[in-house]
Image (tube, rainbow, N blue to C red):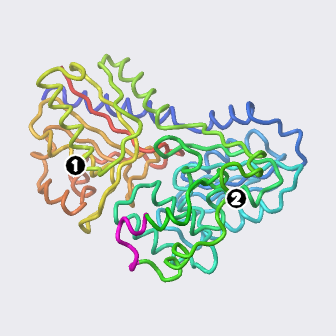
């Protein structure tokens, strides 16, 4: 495996190019120039939430400075960004906490204060749904936390989780835009969902919501959670309440939702970097979904096809994909979907010479761990002192790769555009 070390170096270089393309700072600055003239407004307010919202808020503050009358963004615990005009509140993720609730209430207050001659700039990125919890009364935060845990553990897709979240919330599903009316609302959005739909990203606080209480309840029944939900959550989803604002509501005439970054842009940057390194490059999709280990095994099957038949591209090859897969938790181990992706792929490429697979979450945090993901190759299974199959069965990918020194640890990247998967094969 004479090329293994170079493949690993190249994979990390391609990863870095993809992350650089997702940096929201420049995108925020461009959007502010192109989308609005702040001088026409009496006051400017800034609110938001998400893993990248601190970085986005810093870019807004650098551009607008003292024009900002007030602001608040909810960021993930561990975020080090502190600003002068905009509050940054550290909150729990992926399970909402009291700090997130307090920040969400402050965000709602700021929006409600805005008048018809004001501008509200909203900044949303991945993680905003959990970081900005505001349960609709009488539901408590603890009840929403339990509901979130159940949905995460059962393998529900992010769109399904957000459909439920919208109908348990006082501000999601367009309801924040309702609070801000009649002010002008400009939402700058870093997409972490397949399809880049503003109604899905962050559970769409400023976007029309076409989903209904009936659809939210159908998610619950699909995963057999009816009798595991807290009673008041079950009652609200079954009985309904005031619906979120729908497409065609006049309040959205004064709202602009602008997607400023996406997984596709990062994949394109990765492809350019791979071609510069002289790999024959193919982007599979920016819309991968499904069970993580199954998607990983499809990638391993493509690697075998390249080795046997030179299809769909010949080596040296770089296969690139992105999206957001899901893990159905079966064990009590430690890991995240990208580490599990790398582990499942490692089992299927065991013994394949000069083949490397890297998988990361672009936010730098994979599940409840300090790793962004992991890197694996044809020797991974043989080099480990642990059983790869047992680790996979227990959802225990983190210690498996930690032992090998093959975790990818980037720290917080200041962005979040779903996941990045790279597969490199030498000729």
Query: Between 109 and 370, which is closer to the camera in this rendering?
Result: 109
- The overriding secondary structure of the stretch rendered in magenta is loop
Residue 335 as seen in the image, left or right of residue 58: left
Which residue is pictured at 70% across the width and 52% down the height? 83
Q: Secondary structure at mark 2?
A: helix
On residue 401, the disc is none
Residue 34: image location, x then y, percent: 73, 30
Q: Is residue 80 left or right of residue 337?
A: right
Q: Which mark is in front, 1 or 2?
A: 2
Left or right: 348 as drawn, with respect to 56: left
- Horizontal relation, residue 264 to residue 184: left or right: left
The residue that appears at 40% across and 42% down in the rendered structure is 323
- Quadrant in which residue 321 is drawn: top left
- Which residue occupies 26% across, 53% down? 402
Q: Which residue corresponds to mark 1?
A: 343
Q: Using the image, tell me which numbered label, if any, was put on residue 176.
A: 2
Quadrant of the rendered image containing residue 329: bottom left
> Residue 90: percent from the left, percent from the top?
59, 63
Few, some or many residues within 10 Å of mark 2 (<14, 14–19, 20+): many
Q: Which quadrant of the rendered structure holds the N terminus?
A: top left
Q: Residues within 10 Å of mark 1 (few under 14, many from 20)?
A: many
Q: Quadrant of residue 171?
A: bottom right
Q: What residue appears at the point 21 percent right and 27 percent down from the top-left corner?
A: 425
Residue 347: image location, x then y, percent? 15, 46
- For this orientation, the residue located farthest to the bottom is 231
Mark 1 lies on a secondary structure that is helix
**The residue stretch that appears in magenta:** 219-228
Tag 1 near tag 2, CB within 8 Å: no
How many angstroms separate mark 1 from mark 2 (CA)?
Answer: 40 Å
Q: Is residue 339 magenta?
A: no
The quadrant of the image that shows the C terminus is: top left
């Amino acid at each position: 495996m004479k090329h293994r070390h170079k493949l690993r170096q190249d994979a990390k270089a391609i990863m870095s190019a993809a992350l650089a393309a997702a940096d929201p700072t420049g995108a925020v600055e461009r959007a502010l120039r192109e989308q609005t003239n702040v001088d026409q407004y009496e006051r400017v307010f800034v609110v938001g939430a998400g893993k990248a919202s601190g970085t986005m808020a810093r870019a807004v503050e650098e551009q607008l400075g003292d024009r900002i009358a007030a602001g608040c963004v909810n960021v993930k615990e561990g975020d080090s960004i502190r600003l002068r005009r905009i509050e940054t509140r550290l909150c729990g993720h992926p399970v909402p906490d009291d700090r997130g609730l307090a920040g969400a209430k402050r965000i709602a207050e700021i929006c409600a204060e805005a008048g018809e001659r004001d501008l509200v700039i909203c900044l949303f990125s991945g993680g905003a749904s959990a970081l900005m919890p505001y349960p609709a009364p009488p539901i408590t935060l603890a009840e929403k936390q339990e509901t979130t845990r159940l949905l995460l553990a059962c393998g529900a897709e992010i769109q399904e989780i957000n459909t439920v979240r919208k109908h348990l919330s006082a501000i999601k599903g367009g309801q924040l835009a309702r609070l801000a009316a009649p002010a002008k609302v400009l939402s700058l959005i870093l997409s972490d969902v397949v399809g880049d739909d503003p109604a899905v990203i962050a559970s769409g606080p400023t976007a029309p919501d076409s989903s209904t209480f009936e659809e939210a309840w159908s998610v619950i029944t699909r995963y057999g959670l009816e009798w595991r939900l807290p009673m008041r959550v079950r009652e609200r989803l079954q009985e309904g309440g005031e619906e979120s604002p729908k497409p065609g509501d006049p309040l959205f005439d004064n709202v602009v939702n602008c997607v400023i970054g996406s997984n596709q842009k990062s994949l394109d940057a990765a492809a350019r970097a791979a071609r510069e390194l002289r790999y024959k490059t193919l982007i599979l999709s920016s819309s991968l979904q499904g069970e993580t280990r199954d998607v990983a095994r499809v990638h391993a099957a493509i690697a075998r096809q390249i080795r046997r038949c030179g299809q769909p591209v010949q080596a040296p090859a770089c296969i690139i994909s992105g999206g957001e897969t899901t893990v159905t938790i079966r064990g009590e181990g430690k890991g995240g979907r990208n580490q599990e992706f790398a582990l499942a792929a490692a089992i299927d490429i065991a013994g394949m010479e000069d083949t490397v697979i890297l998988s990361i979450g672009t936010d730098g945090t994979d599940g409840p761990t300090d790793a962004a993901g992991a890197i694996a190759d044809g020797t991974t299974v043989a080099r480990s002192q642990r059983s790869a199959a047992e680790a996979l069965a227990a959802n225990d990918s983190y210690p498996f790769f930690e032992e090998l020194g093959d975790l990818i640890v980037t720290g917080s990247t200041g962005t979040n555009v779903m996941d990045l998967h790279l597969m490199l094969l030498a000729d």
